[in-house]
């Protein structure tokens, strides 16, 4: 058995234990990602300081939520890539490894390098730097990458909210974090981000509010 | 008349320079010979690597990362690489990248220690296919894999290459032949020792058909052709506190082609008049 398999089993066990420990020890919640949680609890912790991952010195608040879900964590150990944001409405196109979702009233159009995704609410266009990900509520999500929220605002030049699927190289300033079903979300205003790998680098992808 | 004299003069200078460089240059008016010689030296390198079941090395890489809106950013990355052919690789990148990768013939696990995250992707059965896949699907090219012949469909090994043995240079106290290749996609050079193991000391490439025409320079060191490795070398030991995160694929790798969509949803003419989301800012 691979060490990673052992690790997963260990995580499952640790996760079950953490279910009971979580109220008294919120720091154990990280392992909840790969576990079955049967309770719902909320803990809050605040941290201040500089994080190399987050490149921010703002005060952050972390909230932890636990639900009975084991599939909405966005990651399934041993599987290929993205199982988060399960498409609830509409058909789904499964690529060889990943997901590209076709919405109930839309189609996906792919170009040579990028893709244009037709969703219920219009057209999302992604160019050669586009990346595909499944939207949580049936819409096709094709994400573009930007250096930061500020860079996105400059490039987008629109007043609507940042599109689900958009990915930033850095989290927005002034974010808070919340852990839900073992996944850490970065929250700025009403926008939720989760971490993803893009080209081997950790990015922050806009996702639908997870709860 | 003066033009002819100038051409003669320049030719003589080139000839003298060629002699001064040991005569290994192809600029003697025989490009076919130059290509044959460059190909032969490169083949020695490739053959040596292919005949070695396991090896390790470190690199210092200086490369361009194309930026949205134009231009490039410079990245300095140190990498340690361990390979066991045909289906194992471990590499760890530090500096401007924080990524450790383990490939065991079935999957590749990525870990980023600063962020305390990891991800996993299923991988083909061979290293060559995996190198292609992480480049094409996940946007993670490993330039040295192409150079070393580990990349099944690398851009460097193009039959349409023009090639020359340009000159000799000393890298780290070792005299090297400098081979220069050009094809439609890449202009590249590799420095291979004149004597001893024909393992590369330096590599430079300019990817002409990629956005921003990024360049990469890689210096090799610490070649070890009999490293102490076990299967565990290629298995990730993921700390419990690390969070698993998705690895996003390039849209072109997973999205269906236009024709497929049209077949599946012919009546799907979306008449929504909502404004399109922001077009990519190229």
Image: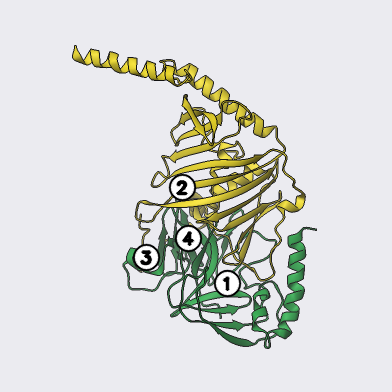
Please name the residue shown 66% across and 86% down the image. A40
N-terminal of the two: label 3 or label 4? 4
- Asked if residue A102 can be seen in this view, the reply is no
Is the Cβ of the residue at disc 3 closer than 8 Å to that at disc 2?
Answer: no
Spatial separation of the CA atoms under disc 3 and disc 1:
32 Å
> In the image, are marks 1 and 4 on the same chain?
yes
B111 to A11, vertically: above or below: above
Local packing at callout 1 (Cα closer than 10 Å; few below 14, some 14-19, many 20+) is some
| Residue at the extreme right of the image, as rendered | A1
Which image quadrant is residue A200 in?
A: bottom right
Q: Position of residue B252 (x, y in %)?
A: 50, 51
> In the image, are marks 3 and 2 on the same chain?
no
Spatial separation of the CA atoms under disc 3 and disc 4:
29 Å
Q: Chain of mark 4?
A: A
- Asked if residue A181 can be seen in this view, the reply is yes
Q: Is residue B52 left or right of residue A51?
A: right
| Chain A tint as drawn | green
Please name the residue shown 35% across and 58% down the image. B281
| Chain B tint as drawn | yellow
Mark 1 highlights which residue?
A: A88
> In the image, are marks 4 and 2 on the same chain?
no
> In the image, are marks 2 and 1 on the same chain?
no
Q: Chain of mark 2?
A: B
Q: Position of residue A20 (x, y in %)?
A: 73, 85
Please name the residue shown 72% across and 84% down the image. A21
A153 to B59, vertically: above or below: below
Mark 3 vs mark 1: in front = 3
Mark 4 highlights which residue?
A: A107
On residue A151, the disc is 3
Q: Say what secondary structure mark 4 lies in.
A: loop
């Amino acid at each position: 058995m691979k060490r990673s398999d052992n690790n997963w089993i260990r995580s499952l066990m640790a996760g079950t234990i953490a279910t009971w420990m979580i109220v008294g020890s919120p720091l154990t919640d990280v392992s909840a990602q790969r576990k079955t949680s049967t309770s719902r609890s909320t803990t809050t912790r605040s941290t201040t300081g500089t994080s190399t991952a987050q490149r921010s010195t703002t005060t952050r608040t972390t909230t932890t939520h636990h639900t009975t879900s084991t599939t909405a964590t966005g990651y399934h150990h041993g599987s290929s890539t993205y199982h988060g944001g399960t498409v609830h409405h509409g058909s789904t196109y499964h690529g060889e490894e990943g997901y590209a979702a076709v919405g109930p009233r839309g189609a996906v159009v792919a170009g040579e390098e990028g893709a244009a995704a037709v969703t219920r609410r219009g057209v999302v266009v992604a160019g050669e730097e586009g990346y595909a990900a499944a939207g949580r509520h049936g819409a096709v999500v094709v994400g573009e990458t930007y250096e930061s929220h500020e860079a996105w605002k400059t490039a987008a030049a629109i007043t609507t909210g940042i599109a689900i699927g958009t990915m930033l190289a850095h989290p927005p300033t002034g974010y808070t974090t919340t852990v839900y079903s073992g996944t850490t979300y970065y929250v700025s205003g009403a926008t939720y981000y989760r971490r993803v790998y893009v080209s081997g680098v950790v990015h922050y992808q806009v996702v639908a509010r997870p709860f | 008349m003066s033009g002819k004299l100038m051409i003669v003069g320049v030719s003589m200078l080139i000839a003298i320079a060629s002699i001064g460089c040991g005569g290994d240059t192809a600029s003697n008016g025989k490009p076919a010979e130059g290509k044959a010689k460059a190909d032969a030296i490169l083949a020695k390198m490739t053959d040596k690597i292919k005949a070695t079941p396991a090896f390790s090395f470190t690199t210092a890489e200086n490369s361009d990362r194309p930026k949205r809106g134009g231009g490039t950013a410079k990245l300095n990355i140190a990498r340690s690489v361990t390979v066991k052919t045909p289906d194992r690789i471990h590499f760890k990148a530090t500096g401007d990248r924080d990524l450790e990768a383990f490939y065991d013939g079935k999957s590749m696990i990525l870990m980023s220690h600063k962020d305390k995250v990891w991800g996993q992707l299923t991988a083909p059965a061979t290293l060559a296919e995996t190198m292609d896949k992480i480049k094409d699907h996940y946007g993670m090219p490993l330039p040295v894999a192409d150079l070393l012949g580990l990349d099944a469909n690398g851009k460097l090994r193009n039959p349409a290459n023009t090639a020359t043995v340009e000159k000799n240079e000393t890298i780290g106290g070792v005299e090297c032949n400098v081979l220069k290749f050009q094809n439609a996609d890449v202009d590249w050079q590799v420095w291979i020792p004149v004597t001893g193991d024909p393992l590369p000391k330096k590599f430079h490439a300019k990817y002409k058909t990629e956005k921003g025409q990024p360049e990469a320079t890689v210096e090799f060191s610490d070649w070890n052709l009999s490293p102490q490795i076990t299967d565990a070398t290629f298995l990730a030991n993921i700390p419990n506190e690390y969070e698993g995160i998705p690895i996003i694929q390039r849209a072109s790798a997973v999205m269906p082609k236009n024709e497929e969509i049209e077949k599946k949803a012919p009546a799907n003419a979306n008449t929504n008049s909502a404004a399109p989301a922001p077009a990519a800012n190229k």
